[in-house]
Image: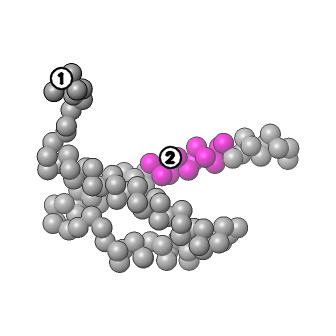
Amino acid sequence: MTIDDLRRRIDDLDEELVALLSARAECALAIGRLKHALGLAVYQPDREQQVLAHVRGVNKGPLDGQAMTRLFERIIDEARRLEREALEQATHGPEGDRTRADA
């Protein structure tokens, strides 16, 4: 394979990653809605540790377990941010698009 072939492959993989990360985020938002309905906290450290252990367990490299942990910690952080924003909107409503001139 040429460098251009490999770069095209990376672009294709990046597109798949974006789609998968978006699908994962949708699941996280659905879980956030259920947590809210059940009165559960957004942050659940035990579950986070389960997820991290799972991804390390299924990882076959070449990224090592520490690299996979760092990547998934960031993914989890973003999912938690989405959950918090959705909870904020659900409890306080959208803020709207007011500018300073409108205030």
Is 47 drawn above or below residue 11 in the view shown?
A: below
Q: Secondary structure at mark 1?
A: helix
- Expressed as whole percent of the image width and height from the top left, the position of residue 82 reads 33, 52
Vertical position of residue 101 compared to residue 24: above or below = above
73 is within the stretch colored magenta: no
Please give the residue where the numbered disc 2 appears in the rendered image: 19
Q: Residue at x 61, y 46 (%)?
A: 14
Q: Quadrant of residue 32?
A: bottom left
User: Was residue 18 drawn as part of the magenta stretch in this picture?
Assistant: yes
Where is 7 relative to 63, above or below? above
What amino acid type should be assigned to the residue bearing mark 2?
A: Ala
The 10 Å Cα crowd at callout 2, few under 14, some 14 to 19, many 20 or more, is few
Q: Which residues are magenta?
A: 11-22
Q: Position of residue 87 (x, y in %)?
A: 21, 53
- Residue at 59% from the left image edge and 73% from the top image edge: 66
Per the image, label 2 sits on a secondary structure element best described as helix
Residue sitting farthest toward the top? 101
Tell me, yes or no, if residue 49 can be seen here: yes
Left or right: where 40 falls relative to 7: left
Q: Nearer the viewer, mark 1 or mark 2?
A: 1
Identify which residue, 65 or 59, lies in the foreground: 65
For residue 82, side relative to residue 100 (left or right)? right
Q: Considering depth in this image, is 92 or 57 the residue closer to the camera?
A: 92
Which residue shows up at 85% across the image and 44% down it? Answer: 2
Which quadrant holds residue 96?
A: top left
